Amino acid sequence: MTQDRIVKGVALLAVTVLVWGATFPIGKDAVTRIDPYWLGALRYVVVAPLFAVVLWVVEGRRALTYEGKMGVAVLVGCVGFGGFNLFTFGGMQHTAAAHAAIIMALQAPLTAIVHWAWRGVRPARFTLVCMTLALLGVILVITKGDVASAVAGGTLFGDALVFLGASSWVAYIMGVVKFSGWSALRYTALTCIPGAIGLVAVALGVTALGVVQLPTASSIAPVGWQLAFLTFLTAFIGVLFWNNGIRLIGPLNAVLFGNLVPIVTFAIRIAQGHRFTVIELAGAVLVVGALAANNLYIRRVVTRAA
């Protein structure tokens, strides 16, 4: 791995971490003005065509074909992009941005659990300990050490929805095994398209039922820059940079960077004037520390096996 390759990969991942860390405070602002149904639909009705264009330019027109895998792509895309957006932003209407960020950090442990349940691949003992510590840290953050108070405050409902959003994305990640031979860009683009269609269909459906109102230019304008950020930076640039960063410096290094996302979110909230309790900060440190320790452990195991 050349130094130039490392520098480029680190730069791409650093931008991604900053963007994704800012996504939660910005998303929290956005869902105060626009419901999660139309927030997801408006984002991906723009992002899906952008991914398709990039795929065409990078891999050619033939890469836009599904090769008999359209049914699976529709299912994976709707679960991944649809579930993630609806549950995550729906949950953020009822919980704090920091809660959402720290819950999303559980995606790596969740993936290991799914591997264990689905394929019988039991995580190493050290990994299980780290997973337990990370879960404990999340509980400390969302309850502040007082479960009864968290229940009374109503944030646990939002936290549960965000957890479902994280689980939806884990299912999406696992779905890649059905698309062997496809690049990360192709998998993203061809599953994003049906995901976007699903989000629009759901938004139109709940609007027709009177659950939400069709957004207007005047209702979107107050959160215009937030919507633009969540669309172009979070969903498009962030994903492209992440995929290219992985290609340049490898998935283990990328995941280590990904663990920094909650730190960015907490830093932004502190800059905005929010004051976290000692228990919340301790929980966040526990989550990030446990995930980082597990990543370094896996790195060591891989190096020994090489």
Image (spheres, grey):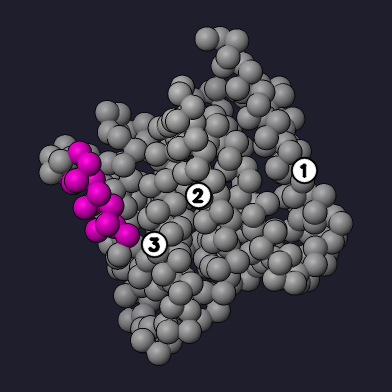
Q: Secondary structure at mark 2?
A: helix
The three-letter amino acid code for the residue at tag 1 is Leu
| Of 147 and 236, the residue lying toward us | 236
Q: Secondary structure at mark 3?
A: helix
| Residue in view at x 15 percent, y 41 percent | 60
Does residue 208 sit above or below 12 in this rendering?
below
Based on the picture, tell me whether residue 142 belongs to the magenta stretch. no
Based on the picture, tell me whether residue 50 belongs to the magenta stretch. yes
In screen coordinates, is 141 left or right of 160?
Answer: right
The three-letter amino acid code for the residue at tag 3 is Phe
Q: Secondary structure at mark 1?
A: helix
The residue pinned by badge 2 equals 16
Label of residue 248 in the image: none
Question: x and y percent of residue 142 in the render?
Answer: 74, 58
Label of residue 232 in the image: 3
The residue pinned by badge 1 equals 286
What's drawn in magenta, residue-wise?
Answer: 47-59
Please report whichever mark, 2 or 3, sits nearer to the chain's N-terminal start: 2
The three-letter amino acid code for the residue at tag 2 is Thr
Q: Based on the displayed image, in which of its 4 quarters is residue 58 positioned?
A: top left
Instruction: State how far apart marks 2 and 3 are (Cα).
Output: 12 Å
Question: x and y percent of residue 115 in the render?
Answer: 52, 30
Does residue 273 sit above or below 143 in this rendering?
below
| Of 45 and 56, the residue lying toward us | 56
In screen coordinates, is 65 left or right of 207?
Answer: left
